[in-house]
Every structure is written in structure tokens, then in C-alpha cells.
Image (cartoon, rainbow, N blue to C red):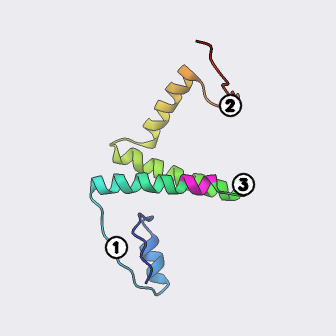
């Protein structure tokens, strides 16, 4: 039996059960959950970086967005509040639409 030891989406046990396979799960406490979400975000970011098609990249970005929702909630917030922070930062510092690549700054 393969051992995964990783955070999975809520419906994965249901999907595994429907396939007729047996599995074992546990429920994480808050600190364990935050730790595993951070690990999962690294995993999904790596998968995005290795995506070879636009569709694959979008799928990985969707996974990252789902993790961002969960991370915001684990910090007692929401993705809407995170987006407000993003907007304020964009107003002050801009976004990335202009594709500016800083080469150097003279002292």
C-alpha cells in the first residue's frame, strides 16, 4: 500500500472510496494544518513551474488559488481581504503589467 502522508482536497477520500480502495486519514490540528498548507503550496508552485502547456499551468494556478483561500482562512481572514491587501500594494507600488526588469541601482 503506497504511503502519501500529505494534505489532500476534502473529496479525495470519497473518490478513493468509490474506486473500491481502502485508505487511512487523520484530521490535522491548526498548527499541523498550516504547516501542511505551506508544504502543499510549495508542491503546487513547483508543479506550476514545471507545467509545459497553458492548460496545465492554469490547472496548477487553480490549485495554488485554492491553497491561498485555505491559507487566508487559517489566518482568520478571507481571500477577499487578501485581495484588498493586494490592491493597496498595487496602488502604492504597482503591479507587474509593465514587465519591468530592474537591472541595477546606482548608490
Say whether disc 1 or disc 2 marks the residue closer to the N-terminus.
1
Say whether disc 3 or disc 1 marks the residue closer to the N-terminus.
1
Q: Dot 2 surroundings within 10 Å: few (below 14), some, or many (20 or more)?
A: few
Q: Relative to residue 96, is residue 76 depicted above or below?
A: below
| Res 8 → quadrant | bottom left
Identify the residue shown where x is 53% and y is 51%. Answer: 64
Q: Which residue is situated farthest in the front direction here?
A: 107
| Res 1 → quadrant | bottom left
| Res 46 → quadrant | bottom right
Question: Which mark is on residue 97?
Answer: 2
At mark 2, the secondary structure is: loop
For the residues labelled 3 and 2, the Cα–Cα distance comes to: 19 Å
Q: Is residue 69 magenta?
A: no
Closer-to-camera residue (34/91): 34
Closer-to-camera residue (102/67): 102
Image coords of residue 15 (percent x, y)? 48, 76
Closer-to-camera residue (102/75): 102
For the residues labelled 1 and 2, the Cα–Cα distance comes to: 43 Å
At mark 3, the secondary structure is: helix
Q: Which residue in the structure is indicated by mark 1?
A: 25
Say whether disc 3 or disc 2 marks the residue closer to the N-terminus.
3
Image coords of residue 58 (percent x, y)? 65, 54
Range drawn in magenta: 45-49
Q: Relative to residue 9, is residue 85 depicted above or below?
A: above
Q: Which residue in the structure is indicated by mark 3?
A: 54
Closer-to-camera residue (55/80): 55
For the residues labelled 3 and 1, the Cα–Cα distance comes to: 33 Å
69 sits to left or right of 92? left
99 sits to left or right of 48? right
Amino acid at each position: 500500500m503506497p504511503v502519501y502522508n500529505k494534505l489532500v482536497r476534502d473529496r479525495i477520500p470519497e473518490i478513493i472510496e468509490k474506486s473500491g480502495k481502502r485508505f487511512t486519514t487523520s484530521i490535522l490540528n491548526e498548527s499541523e494544518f498550516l504547516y501542511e498548507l505551506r508544504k502543499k503550496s510549495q508542491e503546487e508552485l513547483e508543479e506550476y513551474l514545471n507545467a509545459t502547456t497553458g492548460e496545465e499551468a492554469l490547472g496548477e494556478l487553480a490549485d495554488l488559488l485554492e491553497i491561498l483561500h485555505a491559507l487566508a482562512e487559517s489566518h482568520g481572514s478571507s481571500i477577499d481581504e487578501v485581495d484588498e491587501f493586494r490592491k493597496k500594494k498595487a496602488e502604492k507600488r504597482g503591479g507587474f503589467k509593465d514587465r519591468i526588469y530592474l537591472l541595477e541601482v546606482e548608490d
